Every structure is written in structure tokens, then in C-alpha cells.
Amino acid sequence: MNNHLTLELKTPEGNLAESIQAIWYAKAHLAGEQWLACDGATGVIFPVTGEVLLDDESLAHPYVFQQTSTHASKLSFSKGAQFCGIRFNPTVLPELKRNDHPLIATPSLCAIAESLQDNASLAAFVALISRHFTNNKNINQSNKHSKHLIRNLIELTPLETAYQLAPLSQRQLERQVKDQCGVTPKYFERIYRVKLAKQAIKDNPEMSFADIALECGFADQPHLIKEFKAIMHITPAKYRKLLKDSQTKQTKLILR
């Protein structure tokens, strides 16, 4: 939560976890903006009330698909806005589309959006989504090798090692990941290395950027800065300052 926005997040389990990495609901107390981290995944956003913009483009009712995220995105919102979303695991959305999964059918998405107008909450949203995932038998497993490769990259397995752990050739894997996600395995590796550095900056406020670069697998500090800015649209120093400023504001609020 920041001073402008309350964000509730559900990490799915069971059948849902096979396809969805997060389900979230947000309510704005004041007009503001928040940066969405890049993770190479796709999603659906449901604007419920108020105005919501993604990278300065208004999100229209009843829902909007998010394409594969390759860099951080700016989410802006009006006072009192309510909005929620689904974050799919990488490779999943194309798989659901190929199999005509009921969740992403237009009538299903419109019905979810209509129900949220009457009852917008995380619990209600999770229930609306869950009814479409009683089993996964209609989802084929043609992307299982891509999923395995990306899972290894998420766990920061070096790319060459991740290729060696897969039963397909490097060229086949590159083609599959590119077709299913719109980005290459190499780009996924970049995304998750930056994500690790972002967490390291958050967890270790006084750690030098040179040490963070070394710990997170960058060649050196300039390499960290270049990659961080390309993916996050902000420098590591600016990100650290924003974290410190946010913590100072929260401390002042507690002391009042």
C-alpha cells in the first residue's frame, strides 16, 4: 500500500496457480500513479469505477488485455477509482486462446466486469475467476518446455545452463518462447536479473551498486545501471531515493 492506493493481492494455489501468478484488487484514496514492474507476463485489467490509465492511455470498460510486459509501465488513477486484474504466467495467455478457454471468452470477461460493478472486492473477483478453473484438462501442454525454461530463468539459472536442462534444441526453445511470449529467452534473462537487483536495492538500502551488480550477475556497475534503466525506466539511484522518500513519509504519518 502507498498513501494513494490500497492494493490487495492473491497468489493462487492448485489449478489456478498453473495459469495465474496473481489476482489483485486496488482502490485509490487519492489521485496518483504507480509503476508496474516488468516481469514478461500478460494480464487483464478490469476498470471498475473512476478513471484508470496505463502509460497515459485510458483503460476502457469492460476490460483490457495487457500484452507481454517488456518494461515498467505507469499506472495512473483518479480519486476513488477501483480496478482489478489477472496476471497470467508467461506463455499461458496464448495457450488459453488456442484452447478457447472459457475464462478469456468475451461473454465470460464481460460477465466478470458486470459482476464487479455490483460487488468489487478481491474475494468476489477470485470467486469469479475460480469457477473457470475447476480443471485444466482443456489446456494442452505444448508449451511445457517453454514453461520449464522460463521457470529456470525466473530462478536465475544462467541461460546456457537452462538450455542444457531442456530436451529441445536451443533454436527450438528460442522459437517457442518468442512465438508464445513475444520476447526471446535472452530478454527474459535480462528481466529477471533486473528484478533481482530491484529486490536487492529494496532489501539492502546501504549496499553499494557495485556490490549489487556483482551479486546479481551483472558485468559491473555501469551494466547494472544501463539494464535497470532500460527495463524499469528509472535508474537504480532514483529507485533507491523513491524507496527512502516513501519510507520517510510513512514514518511521518505514524508519528502524527
Image (cartoon, rainbow, N blue to C red):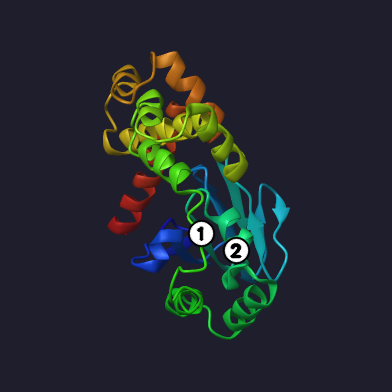
At which x and y percent is residue 8? 41, 66
- The residue to which callout 2 is attached is 99
Whole-percent x, y for residue 253 in the image: 35, 57
Marks 1/2: CA–CA distance: 7 Å
Residue that appears at 48% across and 43% down: 39
Secondary structure, mark 2, is loop
Residue to which mark 1 is pinned: 140
Report the quarter where the N terminus lies.
bottom left
Residue 132: percent from left, percent from top: 51, 75
Q: Which mark is residue 23?
A: none
Check disc 2 and give the amino acid type: Asn
Q: Is residue 107 above or below residue 231?
A: below
Left or right of residue 105, residue 221 in this image: left
The answer to the question of whether label 1 and label 2 lie on touching residues, with beta carbons closer than 8 A, is: yes
Q: What is the crowding at mark 1: few (fewer than 14 residues within 10 Å), some, or many (at least 20)?
A: few
Q: Quadrant of residue 105?
A: bottom right
User: Considering depth in this image, is 107 or 255 the residue closer to the camera?
Assistant: 107
